[in-house]
Amino acid sequence: MLEKTLRVNQLIGYYWDLLTAHQQELVQLYYADDLSLAEIAEQYEISRQAVHRTVKQAEASLEEYEAKLGLLVKAKERRELLDQLASGIHTRQSAQELLLLVDELKELDD
């Protein structure tokens, strides 16, 4: 469950504005405020199943956006390349090797 929560929170960082206002509210309560489905249902005077369905739809939308746009994957790749670049600078890799890493970084945005 923790892995899923971390993934959803990462996806939220990139695709939050693409969720509907209602999805945002329920996802916020469920993931950030750690309320149960029953607590959210009571607060909104809807069924627990309706809350569950909305949260699952939001999760599916987030995964769909990531599958199409890949912003999370690109961010991870970018971080890895930046770490390699920083390490290369500290270990005094050749300028040519460092430039190859810079080129890889540029290609991520093409």
Image: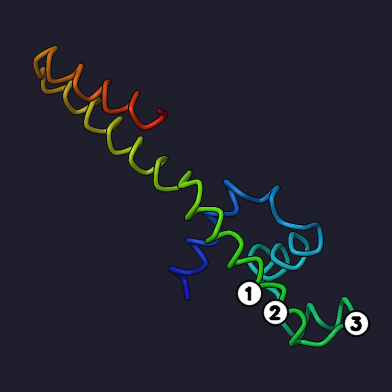
On residue 90, the disc is none
- Amino acid at dot 1: Lys
Quote the CA–CA distance across marks 3 and 1: 19 Å
* The C terminus sits in image quarter: top left
- Tell me if mark 3 has few (under 14), some (14-19) or many (20+) residues whose alpha carbon lies within 10 angstroms of its own: few
Quote the CA–CA distance across marks 3 and 2: 15 Å
| Residue that mark 1 sits on | 56
- Tell me if mark 1 has few (under 14), some (14-19) or many (20+) residues whose alpha carbon lies within 10 angstroms of its own: some
- Tell me if mark 2 has few (under 14), some (14-19) or many (20+) residues whose alpha carbon lies within 10 angstroms of its own: few
For label 1, the SS is: helix
- Amino acid at dot 2: Arg
| Residue that mark 2 sits on | 53
Of badges 3 and 1, nearer the viewer stands: 1
- Amino acid at dot 3: Glu
| Residue that mark 3 sits on | 45
Earlier in the chain: of badge 3 and badge 1, it is 3
Figure label count: 3
